[in-house]
């Protein structure tokens, strides 16, 4: 098991201290729950609550285990801050927050790679999780506030990932309950790392990844073409 991403280059994950190269980005100092509440509090959005902590509940079946409802961002942040349940303002396009793009200069990332396809904001309480899945496009996750833990599995280990029969890009595996998945534990390798504020990770296409919030956090992800 690898506790840090030690292999770099095309086709492998890359973890880096992005803040060291982008200390002039305003997001490092400005972003907080209060900042989003004060500047975008009236924005209509959705929040997901009731994300299961029971590892036997499949994350990809939202109608069975989650509630997503429409609220203002101010109301959503209040839920993140005060709810006993796990709460996630997940995958909100940056265009929903006019002027927010001025808080970061993504050209730093563009110089080394393909063009941006989508940029999203993620705001959540401790305990948020994505469930194991893979994307078809390169994905950069930037941790701005709080911390998250990322588990990853290489595409070459896909035969051991226990995909859901009706959704092959999502896996039943819970990294906190691996005893239920002996085919995986015998044959696959689990990579993982903790992202602190200022860290970023590049997840190549087809790499399985599972992201969980360790604290209340604000993150940004960018998919590239």
Image (spheres, helix red, strand yellow):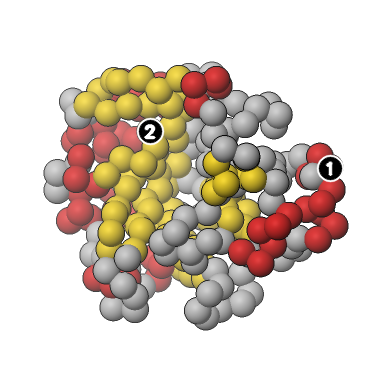
Neighbours of disc 2 within 10 Å: few (<14), some (14-19), many (20+): many
* Residue shown at 85% from the left, 57% from the top: 186
* Residue shown at 81% from the left, 61% from the top: 187
Instruction: Give the vertical position of 214 relative to 53 (above or below).
Output: below
Q: Which mark is residue 136?
A: none
Give the CA distance from mark 1 to mark 2: 31 Å
* Residue shown at 64% from the left, 45% from the top: 163
Where residue 166 appears, as percent x and y from the top left, is 57, 37
Outermost left residue: 99
Q: Quadrant of residue 178?
A: top right
Q: Is residue 195 left or right of residue 193?
A: left
Outermost front residue: 166
Where residue 82 appears, as percent x and y from the top left, is 45, 20
Instruction: Give the vertical position of 126 relative to 104 (above or below).
Output: above
Q: Is residue 7 left or right of residue 204?
A: right
Q: Secondary structure at mark 2?
A: strand
Residue 220 or residue 187, whichever sits in front: 187
Residue 174 or residue 144, whichever sits in front: 174
Q: Which residue is mark 2?
A: 89
Q: Are marks 1 and 2 in contact (CB under 8 Å)?
A: no
* Residue shown at 34% from the left, 78% from the top: 112
Q: Quadrant of residue 47?
A: top left
Q: Which mark is residue 179?
A: 1
Where residue 26 appears, as percent x and y from the top left, is 25, 56
């Amino acid at each position: 098991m690898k506790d840090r991403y030690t292999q770099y280059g095309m086709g492998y994950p890359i973890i880096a201290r992005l803040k060291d190269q982008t200390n002039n980005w305003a997001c490092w100092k400005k972003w907080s729950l209060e900042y989003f509440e004060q500047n975008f509090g009236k924005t209509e959005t959705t929040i997901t609550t009731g994300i299961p902590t029971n590892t036997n509940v499949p994350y990809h079946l939202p109608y069975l285990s989650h509630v997503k409802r429409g609220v203002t961002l101010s109301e959503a942040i209040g839920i993140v801050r005060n709810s006993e349940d796990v709460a996630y303002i997940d995958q909100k396009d940056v265009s929903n927050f006019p002027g927010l793009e001025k808080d970061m200069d993504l050209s730093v990332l563009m110089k080394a790679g393909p063009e941006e396809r989508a940029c999203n904001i993620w705001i959540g309480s401790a305990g948020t999780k994505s469930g194991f899945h893979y994307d078809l496009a390169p994905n950069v996750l930037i941790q701005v506030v709080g911390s998250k833990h990322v588990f990853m599995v290489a595409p070459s280990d896909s035969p051991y990932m226990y995909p859901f029969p009706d959704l092959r890009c999502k896996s039943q595996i819970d990294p906190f309950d691996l005893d239920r998945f002996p085919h995986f534990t015998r044959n696959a390798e689990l990579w993982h790392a903790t992202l602190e504020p200022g860290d970023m990770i590049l997840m190549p296409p087809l790499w399985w990844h599972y992201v969980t919030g360790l604290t209340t956090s604000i993150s940004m992800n960018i998919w590239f073409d």
